[in-house]
Image (cartoon, grey):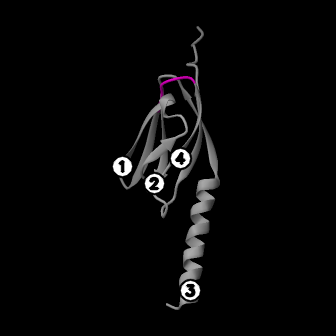
Amino acid sequence: LSMRWLLLLVTSVGLARTAVADDVTRVDIELGSTVEKNVVYARGWMCDDPSLITAQVITRDDHNVWIAKGEKLGHTTCRVGVDKLAASYVFDVHVVPKRTRRS
């Protein structure tokens, strides 16, 4: 493998990783409820305000799932996948009031 091909490969991987991380997905979580997001192979997570949710990344079958539960009303941005060399996902998380059922 020549140096030119190696450089092209590294650049391509870096651009692909950036494309995934730049796509921000809005996630609404009702207070006390849980949501799950498929994050493929991403590991680890962090949020601007981690007090709003409790979360974990678990492995299910052949992929990872980010599970988040709304703990306090508010808005935060969370990144799942903290490894610089792997894909990451950015979520715009809104913990919203629980909907009341009308009879």
Apparent side of residue 39 relative to residue 56 in the rendered image (left or right) = right
Judged by its main secondary structure, the magenta piece is loop
Q: Position of residue 57 (x, y in %)?
A: 40, 45
**For the residues marked 3 and 1, what is the alpha-carbon distance in whole angstroms?**
34 Å
- Marks 2 and 1, the one that precedes in the sequence: 2
- Marks 3 and 2, the one that precedes in the sequence: 3
Q: Which mark is residue 5?
A: 3
Dot 1 amino acid type: Thr
Q: Residue at x 63, y 47 (%)?
A: 24
Mark 3: give few (<14), some (14-19) or many (20+) Cα within 10 Å: few
Secondary element under disc 1, as helix, strand or loop, is strand
Q: Residue at x 55, y 75 (%)?
A: 10
Q: Examine the rendered structure and indicate whether residue 42 appears above or below residue 95.
A: below
- Marks 3 and 4, the one that precedes in the sequence: 3
Residue under circle 2? Answer: 42
Dot 3 amino acid type: Trp
Dot 4 amino acid type: Arg
**For the residues marked 4 and 1, what is the alpha-carbon distance in whole angstroms?**
17 Å
Q: Residue at x 64, y 54 (%)?
A: 22
**Do callouts 3 and 1 mark residues in contact (Cβ within 8 Å)?**
no
**For the residues marked 3 and 2, what is the alpha-carbon distance in whole angstroms?**
27 Å
| Segment tinted magenta in the rendering | 69-73
Outermost residue on the front side: it is: 48
**For the residues marked 2 and 1, what is the alpha-carbon distance in whole angstroms?**
10 Å
Q: Residue at x 64, y 52 (%)?
A: 23
Residue under circle 1? Answer: 59
- Marks 3 and 1, the one that precedes in the sequence: 3
* Number of the front mark, 2 or 1: 2
Q: Examine the rendered structure and indicate whether residue 99 appears above or below residue 66.
A: above
Secondary element under disc 4, as helix, strand or loop, is strand
Residue under circle 4? Answer: 79
Q: Position of residue 52 (x, y in %)?
A: 51, 29
